Image (cartoon, rainbow, N blue to C red):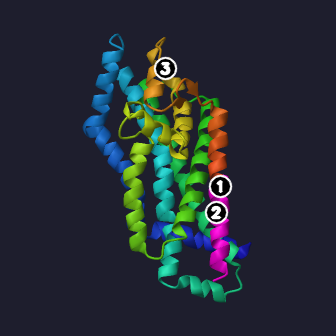
Amino acid sequence: MYSLNMLVKRNIKYYYRYKSNIVYSFLSVMIIIGLNILFLSKMTTDGFAASFPGIDRAKLSFLTDSIMFAALIPISSLSVSLVALSVMVNDVEKKINLDFMTAPIKRSVIMLSYLLSSLIICLVVALIFIAFSGVYLFIESGVFFSPLQIFYMLAATLLSVLFSNIIILYIMSFLKTENGVGGLGTLIGTLIGFISGAYMPIGVMPEAIRYVINVLPFLQTTALIKQAYLPNVAKVLGDVDLTEVYKLYGSDIYFKNFIMPPYLLIISIIAYTVLFGILALIRFRKLQNK
């Protein structure tokens, strides 16, 4: 237990030691926020204004911001875990892992330390995002999250963080250099914005592509978090039918006329997490035998 605690602290210190780690962690988030400030927020609000002509534009901005903030949490979970787990690749590239092997520490403890340290970092970042978004949206509308919303949001965030770390841990086990991590970060940073519906609404994508994205856990975790954010929208906008908005922006995941209920989304995400967890265990056992 002592070895595990020391390794977890060491990995966390590695993450915070370099400012570049923090910058790369939030690069995708900063790009999305920048695009929203420059033009995406205005375009989205203009579209809502055309659909709901009788509603004040400031209230429609609340809807736009709620959608944006909800998408940032799963995106940050992936991007932060990618950088936090890069310490594993750094250890391999610099042969530090060989030093660990000469110490009386089980390999399973070393691998667990990577995962736990990344989970802690990601959860701290996610909680900061939730707190910031809650304060921002409260200032904008005067409406704060209810205790039930906060509970639901934290549960969905925990699922998102756990899945993100498990899948990134598995992928990282195949990388040998930090250049590979950089390439992976570029790929994930580009794709995740589209897959989570942050760059463009899911509903405007071709049906075949939309169905493929719908079965992926990235959109499913985003949908769960959006479902925690959007109840306040009804309080701000009043008696307005937002069914098409929820469908367009991926809060409700449709397959033809079937809407995936929250419990199915949760089961699906847990199943993906268990699957990649098993694959990661198999992968690390193979590495141990080398």
Look at the image and tell me whether residue 226 can be seen.
yes
Classify residue 47 as left or right of residue 135: left
Residue 243: x %, y % from top left: 49, 20
Residue at which label 2 appears: 279
- The amino acid on which the numbered mark 3 sits, given as a three-letter code, is Thr
* Mark in front: 3 vs 2: 2
Look at the image and tell me whether residue 131 can be seen.
no
The quarter holding residue 196 reads top left
Query: What is the residue that sits farthest to the left in this orientation?
Result: 38
**Disc number placed over residue 243 in the picture, else none:** 3
- The amino acid on which the numbered mark 1 sits, given as a three-letter code, is Leu
Classify residue 188 as left or right of residue 156: left
Taking depth in this image into account, of 200 and 165 the one nearest to the observer is 200
Do labels 2 and 1 touch, CB within 8 Å?
yes
SS class of the residue under badge 3? Answer: helix
Q: Which residues are magenta?
A: 274-290
Q: Earlier in the sequence, mark 3 or mark 2?
A: 3
| Residue at x-position 38% and y-position 65% | 183
- Residue 106 vs 281, above or below: the answer is below
| Residue at x-position 57% and y-position 73% | 10
Residue 279: x %, y % from top left: 64, 62
Spatial separation of the CA atoms under disc 3 and disc 2: 38 Å
- The amino acid on which the numbered mark 2 sits, given as a three-letter code, is Leu
Circle 2: is it few (<14), some (14-19), or many (20+) Cα within 10 Å? some
- Residue 9 vs 195, above or below: the answer is below
| Residue at x-position 32% and y-position 29% | 44
